Amino acid sequence: MSPRPRLLPAALALALVTTGALAQPASAAATASAASAATVADPLLDKLAAIPGLTVVSETRPSGFRFFVLTLTQPVDHRRPGKGTYQQRLTLLHRSDDAPVVLYTGGYGLAVNPSASQTEPTRLLGANQVSVEHRFFRSSRPDPADWSKLDIWQQASDEHRIVQALKTVYGGKWIQTGASKGGMTSVYHRRFYPDDVDGVVAYVAPNDRVNPADRAYDEFFENVGDAACRTSLENVQKEALKRRARLVPRFEAEAARNGYTFTQSLGSADRSFEMTVLDAVWAFWQYSNESDCADVPPGTATDDEIYDWIDTVAGFSFYTDQGIGYYVPYYYQAATQLGWPTLKFGHLRGLTRYPGLYQPNSVIPAELRSRHDPLPMLDVDHWVRKQSSRMMFVYGENDPWSAERFTPSRHDSYLYVAPGANHGANIARLPDAERQAATDTLLRWAGVTGAQAAQRGVSSIPDDDMLPDRRTF
């Protein structure tokens, strides 16, 4: 793709024209005024325009801020930068030149039409924020797409070039953050480019360092919540599979009404149905709270009640071509490098039809299926444990993705677990003493005082929980 034309400072004159400020009869004075407006100094825009390969796509000005949508020309392959480029999307939320910068790596795509929001570290620090769309998501995909270039080092190198470019604009401290896959992405960037940022806050970041050795996940489901809740959840899975002959036709009818297909993902409605049922308990603990156990339908529930509960919790539409399409880059990465939860599902023995279904190669197009390479995760895990510094990990007690965690080093690094929290765990949900300690550490890494952060941090910008919407299509 060719880069869009840069929005240069002279374009400010157009903004004045459209608001009527320059819509006056032509005269010498009016002409002089227009020329003056066209050359109004805009140091920030000038600095952005001076970055090679950076395009300012749009700018808005929410209360007290400037918000830019940007693209940066990136090599498809950072090892062979002359072999093609692509346009990577990012956004910039600008508070002030002297505020720290939070680099937010979401691990997925940005919104189709991004708008200003702020992560928890951004708010706590009163910081600027750079949000990055992961390569191969949405429009940040090379054309043609060489999927072998979708790996953790290539994305970390994307982020490295972004940081180096924007450090010409912001000379202060940088903090990186992300949640879930975005938290993993922040860890990988730190591993390969440890000098880019001054600290990392990774939320609910899984660490599947030895993919088949996933006993931690089975132990999680054997102990999370109370026994009655665990039994209810297992029973609803059993009932759904026992009633397959009645529930799958209902799913097929719903798919036909909505145009859902299965040719690029699971292959059939029956396989998609089984995958959704297998995923239901995981999805429950990921997104719900222990108090929601009361809503789990009993074994005596009607077909409609069981179907509707699973649909609400896990979403039958998710494991369709349309639901999975957005997430294909994630599942490709899980299959090749990141790993995935390998569960035994012992309580469903005799009820499932498709052994080995619950894994990422099941849900991506056949041409993208590949063997798993365990070495990258082993390398990252060892580096985090032994060599990393200034890394903070925040997990949720009741979040299945938190069952296999990173273990921080002893070099100014920390691990916190939010009691009773699900996949939305954050610093705010920690006990008071830990919340204060985590906040103080973050402020210290960023080189700001609490007073400075509080002064900058007051705004109407909405908070971002950094988690993708499972029903994003």
Image: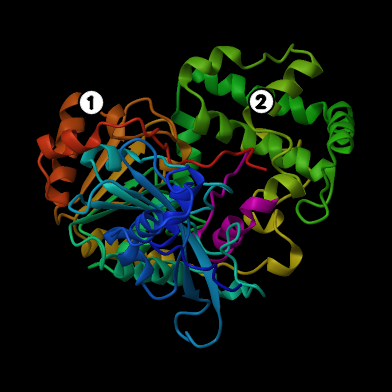
Q: Is residue 359 left or right of residue 74?
A: right
Q: Nearer the viewer, residue 80 or 333?
A: 80
The residue positioned farthest toward the front in the image shown: 27
Residue 94 pos. (x, y %): 31, 49
User: What residue did someone put label 1 on?
Assistant: 431
Disc number placed over residue 57 in the picture, else none: none
Q: Is residue 61 left or right of residue 43?
A: right
Tell me the quadrant of the picture where the C terminus can be found. top right
Q: Nearer the viewer, residue 41 or 155?
A: 41
Q: Is residue 151 visible?
A: yes
Number of numbered markers: 2
Residue stretch rendered in magenta on the structure: 325-345
Q: Secondary structure at mark 1?
A: loop
Q: Is residue 102 left or right of residue 149?
A: left
Residue 236 pos. (x, y %): 68, 23
Q: Secondary structure at mark 2?
A: helix
Task: Note whether 12 is above or below 192 in the view shown.
Answer: above
Instruction: Name the residue located 41 percent from the left edge and 62 percent from the top edge.
Output: 10
Q: Of the residues shown, which amino acid type is indicated by label 2?
A: Thr
User: What residue did someone put label 2 on?
Assistant: 312
Bin the neighbour count of mark 2 within 10 Å (Cα to Cα): few under 14, some 14-19, many 20 and up.
few
Q: Of the residues shown, which amino acid type is indicated by label 1?
A: Pro
Residue 75 in the magenta stretch? The answer is: no
The scheme the figure's colours follow is: rainbow
